[in-house]
Amino acid sequence: MSWVEQSHWDALRPEQRQAFPPIAPDFVLELLSPSDRLATVQAKMQEYMASGVRLGWLIDPGSQQVEVYRQGQASERLVRPASLSGETVLSGFVLNMELVW
C-alpha cells in the first residue's frame, strides 16, 4: 500500500498521471507474508527510502514486530505496538495494531 500527498500529485503534468507516474509515494506499507523473506522486504524498504519515500512501515504479523522507516534516519523496530502513527506524513492517522495481531 502507498500514499502520495495531494500537492505532489497535483504537481504532475496531466500526461504523467495517465501512465506510471514518475513520483515516489510519501508513505508505504509492506505486510510480510509467510512466503516473504524478511531480508528481501527490508532491502525493498531501503530502496523505497532511497527513492524519496518519507515514512514506511514493514509489518511482520508472525513476530508481531514493526520496522518503521523514516527519511534520513535508521529504521526503528517496535515489538507488538498497540498503534502506529502516521506522524507528520499522514497527520492524524493512527493504525490500531490490535486489528493486525
Image: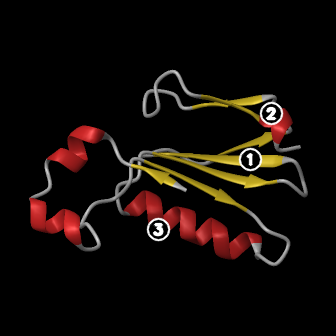
Which of the two labelled residues, at mark 3 and mark 1, occupies the earlier sequence position? Answer: 3
Q: Secondary structure at mark 1?
A: strand
**Residue 15, image x, y percentages:** 11, 68
Is 99 situated left or right of 5 in this image? right
Q: Residues within 10 Å of mark 3 (few under 14, many from 20)?
A: few
**Residue 39, image x, y percentages:** 71, 73
- Whether label 1 touches label 2, CB < 8 Å: yes
**Residue 54, image x, y percentages:** 42, 45
Q: Which residue is mark 3?
A: 47
- Tell which residue pokes out farthest to the top in this image: 92
- Whether label 3 touches label 1, CB < 8 Å: no
Which residue is found at the position 64% from the left and 66% from the top?
A: 42
Q: Amino acid at mark 1?
A: Val
Q: Amino acid at mark 2?
A: Pro
Q: Which residue is mark 2?
A: 81
Is 83 situated left or right of 12 in this image? right
Q: Nearer the viewer, residue 69 or 59?
A: 59
Which residue is found at the position 90% from the left and 54% from the top?
A: 63
Which residue is found at the position 76% from the left and 76% from the top?
A: 37
Q: Which residue is mark 1?
A: 66
Q: Secondary structure at mark 2?
A: loop
Q: Nearer the viewer, residue 29 or 46?
A: 29
